[in-house]
Image (spheres, helix red, strand yellow):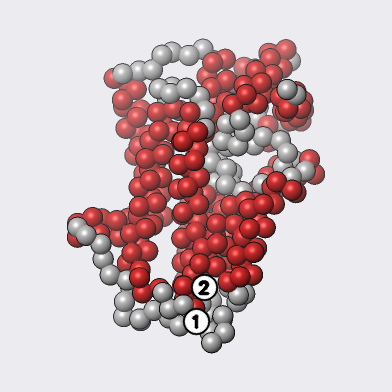
Amino acid sequence: MSQTETPAPPATSRLGKLDVLRGIALIAMATYHTGWDFEFFGYMEPGTTGHGAWKLYARIIASTFLVLVGFSLVLAHRNGIRWRSFGIRLVQIIAASLAITLVTRTITPDSFVFFGILHEIAAASVLGLLFLRLPAIVIAAAAAAVVAAPHYLASAAFDAPALWPLGLSEMPIRSNDYVPIFPWFGPVLAGMALAKTMLHLDLMRIFAGTIRPAWLDRGLRFIGQHSLAFYLIHQPVLISCVFLIAQVFPPATLTPHEVFDRECTRSCSADNDRAFCERFCTCTVGQLETQKIFDDVYTGKRNQDNDPQLQDITGMCTQEAMQP
């Protein structure tokens, strides 16, 4: 039997344990976002959830979720692309990702989500179609190449904002959730390679059946089967809860400069080490004050996306922060 002639799991058996795994990943994501929310409201030091165990936890969660995206893509379309269901799901994901962009642009304009995990899932779902008919070993090799790409292909040529979704820019990108194509399309491809391998070896039936206790199985399956709704709802609920806590037990009051520096450090820390971010943010605040535009930036009247002056400051402070 060739690699592309894969046996299918029993038609009457839904692979419910995949829903359970997806539910576990979503619950884990919610726990991480709880920590992020407490940091956002000032209960933890800036950058806490972007370093150490928190950062590792976040990357494990994102990787697991994206592996499941690739795995499910193969299962759904291994016998031919089901264009109608694919199109409906893609439109839902794109609409949700645009909604997140609009909301975060309003709430945190200096670090809004322009290419987060939902944007990545939408792009990866389309790109993944190109790999559906390839052997698992080829897809696995492509996954490794995509993960390694930022270490070898990063260049100032990709610093233009329009190219930021690629993940190959040399400058630090400020966003509350930045999941670019490189390297994060890699886990999706890894999930596709895994699914093809398991189909080829007739191992997919291990995902059939239920887990114990039954109430846990039902709960996790429900979440896994409604993953997009859970993703969209959980963060507003969590951040509302933390907001209410802040009204009763408020964190220490910060000055505008401290707030800006905290947000800058937290956003920068998602992809850079703490020392670099401290130098970068200190430089940025200093330049904004020197050029007398701090208040405009702090209040959101000006932002980096369409302001050459701010882009120059970011570029200059990036170079300065790179110096030991």
Question: In the image shown, does 75 or 250 lie closer to the viewer?
Answer: 75
Residue placed under numbered mark 2 in the picture:
196
Residue at 57% from the left image edge and 31% from the top image edge = 269
Residue placed under numbered mark 1 in the picture:
6
Location of residue 62 with respect to 123 vertically, above or below? above
Quadrant housing residue 256: top right
Give left or right: position of 150 versus 250.
right
Mark 1–mark 2 Cα distance, whole angstroms, equals: 8 Å
**For marks 1 and 2 on the same chain, the one whose residue lies earlier in the sequence:** 1
Location of residue 263 with respect to 126 vertically, above or below? above
Residue at 46% from the left image edge and 60% from the top image edge = 68
Tell me residue 299's x, y (percent). 57, 22
Give left or right: position of 221 versus 79.
left
Quadrant housing residue 247: top left
Question: In the image shown, does 211 or 233 lie closer to the viewer?
Answer: 211
Residues packed near mark 1 inside 10 Å, few (<14), some (14 to 19) or many (20 plus): some
Tell me residue 307's x, y (percent). 72, 31
Tell me residue 288's x, y (percent). 69, 18
Instruction: Name the kind of residue labelled 2 in the image.
Output: Lys
Q: Secondary structure at mark 2?
A: helix
Q: Secondary structure at mark 1?
A: loop
Q: Are marks 1 and 2 in contact (CB under 8 Å)?
A: yes
Location of residue 238 with respect to 209 vertically, above or below? above
